[in-house]
Image: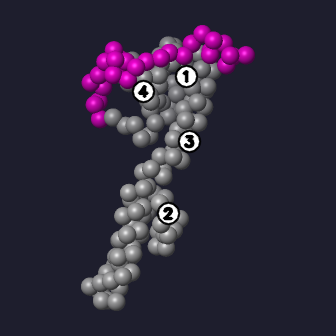
Amino acid sequence: MQKEIKHFIGLTEFQEIKTKYKELVKLYHPDLNANNGEVMKEINSEYDFIVANLARLKSENVNTNIEDRFKDLILELLKLDLELEICGSWIWISGDTKPHKEKLKELKCFWAPKKKRWYFRPDNKKTYSKGKFTMQEIRAKYGSSTIKGQARKQIKA
């Protein structure tokens, strides 16, 4: 379904859209001018449409970016000759990581002290469990696959 957007052109972030909506409400609210009723209905309709479809539209663009970022990161990590384990959308990194600490930080990886390994997670996959789950529980819940052998040899070639 196509909808003509007049008031929110070029806005892609929810916070921008919300801010613009508040500005428009201050300008066109019917309490300020009775003639603004139709304009306000139009603004509300556009806002509702954009908010309802923003997640779908963004996820189409974000998924390809995440997949590319994920592949690039795995290639970089394999160059460091570390053990990689993919559990869901997270990458767990173990092995002799100490010499690569700064590089891992640069790649936006984080240290998990309870698990004694590094991890990378996409920005949209934050967790608030504070390390309550063991690696066995994580593997059981999300599945696990390790990257080694042929993939590692192909990277070094």
Q: Looking at the picture, how far across and down is residue 151, in whole percent?
A: 62, 16
Apparent side of residue 26 relative to residue 3 in the rendered image (left or right)? left
The image quadrant of residue 113 is top left
Which residue bears the numbered disc 4? Answer: 88
User: Does 139 appear in magenta?
Assistant: yes
Tag 1 or tag 4, which sits nearer the N-term?
A: 4
| Pointer 2 local density, CA inside 10 Å: few below 14, some 14–19, many at least 20 | few
Q: Identity of the amino acid at label 3?
A: Asn
Q: Identity of the amino acid at label 1?
A: His
Which residue bears the numbered disc 1? Answer: 100
Residue under the image location 63 percent in, 12 percent down: 150
Q: Dot 3: what SS?
A: helix
Q: Identity of the amino acid at label 4?
A: Gly
Which quarter of the rendered picture does the C terminus lie within?
A: top right
Query: From mark 2 to mark 4, how far is it between C-alphas?
Result: 35 Å
Q: Is residue 97 visible?
A: no
Which residue bears the numbered disc 2? Answer: 2
Q: Looking at the picture, how far across and down is residue 94, in whole percent?
A: 47, 16
Q: Dot 4: what SS?
A: loop
Tag 4 or tag 2, which sits nearer the N-term?
A: 2
Determine contact: label 2, label 4, CB under 8 Å.
Answer: no
Q: Dot 1: what SS?
A: helix
Query: From mark 3 to mark 1, how far is it between C-alphas?
Result: 25 Å
Residue under the image location 47 percent in, 60 percent down: 1
